[in-house]
Image: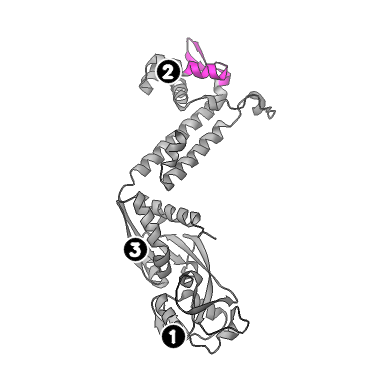
Amino acid sequence: MLKQYILGLNLVKRKIFEMVLNSIQHIANMRLSLDWLDGNYDGKNRGEMEKISIYSCRAISAVVKTRNFTKAAQLLNLTPSAVSHLIKKTENDLGYSLFIRNNKGALLTENGKLLLPYIQSLILTSNTLDSEIEKISNLESGVVRVGAFYSVTAYWLPKIIRLFKTEYPDIEINVSQSGDSTVKEWINNQDIDLAFISKVSLDNSELFLPLHNSTLVCVTPEEYVPADGANMTLEDLKGQPLILQYLGYDTEITTYFSNNNLPLGSNYRVEVDDAALALVEEGLGFFISPEMAVKTNKRRINIYPMSPQMIRTVGIVTVSPEHITPTAKLFRQYVYDYMDESGLLNV
């Protein structure tokens, strides 16, 4: 039944649930015999904590706090006999007593004292699980403002948002698309919650979560072949007409040419990748682009790796981490999980 419950949760809920369950299992697997505490554990007392339910833990903790079964029952909204039954069953399962009763009330035995820190840890972990589930249950509505450049908007976000909306239909995702320089302005002005941007565009990469590496490639007319037949070298580029994107869209290209002491100029400045590819297809120039932006095109063109190679790292920036909304945090985690499970997370 527990497995069916977990499988029925959405991706983010399931990961949190499994994370907390792993913590519980870690605690449950701790060996608490005196031999283990002395460093001489021989495995004889394996699984002691597995014999204690969370209800028994709460009952034990309440009796420790009040030293009285009746007062413990009042704390837990149970009858005294129910508390007695929980503790008696646990003692029978463990094979030793947890409490002694005298004129000072109900006090822990030595074995009970050994178990108490782990019982308290189990209760804390259970409370954390309840709290996280409650937080997620309240994430039913809200707005997430996302800024991105063209490739992310065209190739990643549509599917991510569609899948996200099937699980969170009342959370609104607002997407603004522009070049890296404008997305950077949105970050600085805090006009968005999350930004997809290339690392090279950022002045401060501390808030940058890398997601995907993509190599730069050169797109050429169909009939063109570089000197070695496989890679576009700096020598191949010399004297060739280039098609460039508007300033702010060409951060990596500008950096690449600058690093390799090549002049950068063009008769064509376009905004979107497909416009550049159309010009290339008609033989009007070469276009240098991250591979992710051009590899799915259907045009009559050739695509060659650049030599020397340059890597473009795309990631997500949390614009204001200290004030991130629960819905933005949820969407950010969803994006990361999607990238991981779809094989796009390669950094």
Crowd tier of the residue under label 3, counting other residues whose Cα lies within 10 Å: few below 14, some 14–19, many 20 or above: some
Q: Quadrant of residue 133?
A: top left
Q: Earlier in the sequence, mark 1 or mark 2?
A: 2
Q: Is residue 189 visible?
A: yes
Please give the label number shown on residue 175: 3
Please give the label number shown on residue 120: none
Q: Is residue 246 visible?
A: no
Crowd tier of the residue under label 2, counting other residues whose Cα lies within 10 Å: few below 14, some 14–19, many 20 or above: many
- Residue 5 belongs to magenta span: no
- Report the residue marked by disc 1: 282
Q: Nearer the viewer, residue 218 or 278?
A: 278
Q: Quadrant of residue 29?
A: top right
Q: Earlier in the sequence, mark 2 or mark 3?
A: 2
- Going by the image, does 118 lie left or right of 135? right
Type of the residue with mark 2: Val
**What is the secondary structure assignment of the residue under circle 1?**
loop
> Gap in Å between the C-alphas at discs 2 and 3?
55 Å
The quadrant in which the N terminus is found is top left
Q: Which residues are magenta?
A: 87-111
Tell me residue 255's x, y (percent). Answer: 51, 77
The quadrant in which the C terminus is found is bottom right
Residue under the point 37% across and 53% down = 164
Type of the residue with mark 1: Glu
- Closer to viewer: mark 2 or mark 3: 3
> Gap in Å between the C-alphas at discs 1 and 2?
83 Å
Give the colour scheme shown.
Answer: one colour
- Report the residue marked by disc 2: 83
